[in-house]
């Protein structure tokens, strides 16, 4: 089971519209349940974001560095970590 801290959950709640047309969570508990259900991950660097997509076999069309961070699935938590949510 994944554990998401409040900083990650707040980031998702605030920015969920970058990935979904409608809100999928209205509070921290719903956000945590949703992220656990879709097996979201938190990584500690841009390099780990790139490695995640490579391991999953997801073609990012040669995107690297800052470009990969613009993917709708990638949420910048704001403290050096990134939340990856596959919608």
Image (tube, rainbow, N blue to C red):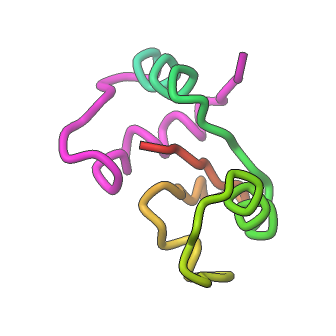
Drawn side of residue 13 relative to residue 48, left or right: left
Q: Is residue 24 a member of the stretch shown in magenta?
A: yes
Disc tally is 0
Q: Residue at x 19, y 39 (%)?
A: 22
Position of residue 76 measured from the top left corner of the image (x, y, whole percent):
57, 59
> What residue is drawn where x is 46% and y is 42%?
12
Residue 38 in the image, given as x and y percentages of width and height: 51, 29
Q: Where, by quadrant of the figure, is residue 39 drawn?
A: top right
The image quadrant where one finds the C terminus is top left
Eyeballing the image, is 58 above or below 68? above
**Which residue corresponds to the image point at 67% horizontal and 57% vertical from the top-left?**
57
Residue drawn at x 29%, y 30% as measured from the top left? 24
Residue that lies at the very extreme toward the left in this rendered image: 22
Across and down, in percent, residue 42 comes to 70, 44
Front one among 78 and 58: 58
Q: Which residues are magenta?
A: 1-28
Left or right: 71 in relation to 2: left
State the residue in front, 26 or 37.
37
Please tell me whether residue 80 belongs to the stretch shown in magenta: no
Question: Quarter holding the N terminus?
Answer: top right
Image x and y of residue 18, in percent: 33, 56
Task: Give whichever of 28, 47 is nearer the camera.
Answer: 47
């Amino acid at each position: 089971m994944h554990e998401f801290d409040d900083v990650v959950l707040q980031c998702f709640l605030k920015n969920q519209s970058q990935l979904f047309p409608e809100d999928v969570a209205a509070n921290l508990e719903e956000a945590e349940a949703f992220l656990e259900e879709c097996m979201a991950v938190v990584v500690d660097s841009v390099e780990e974001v790139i490695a995640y997509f490579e391991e999953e076999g997801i073609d990012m069309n040669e995107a690297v560095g800052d470009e990969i961070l613009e993917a709708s699935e990638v949420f910048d938590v704001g403290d050096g970590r990134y939340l990856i949510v596959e919608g």
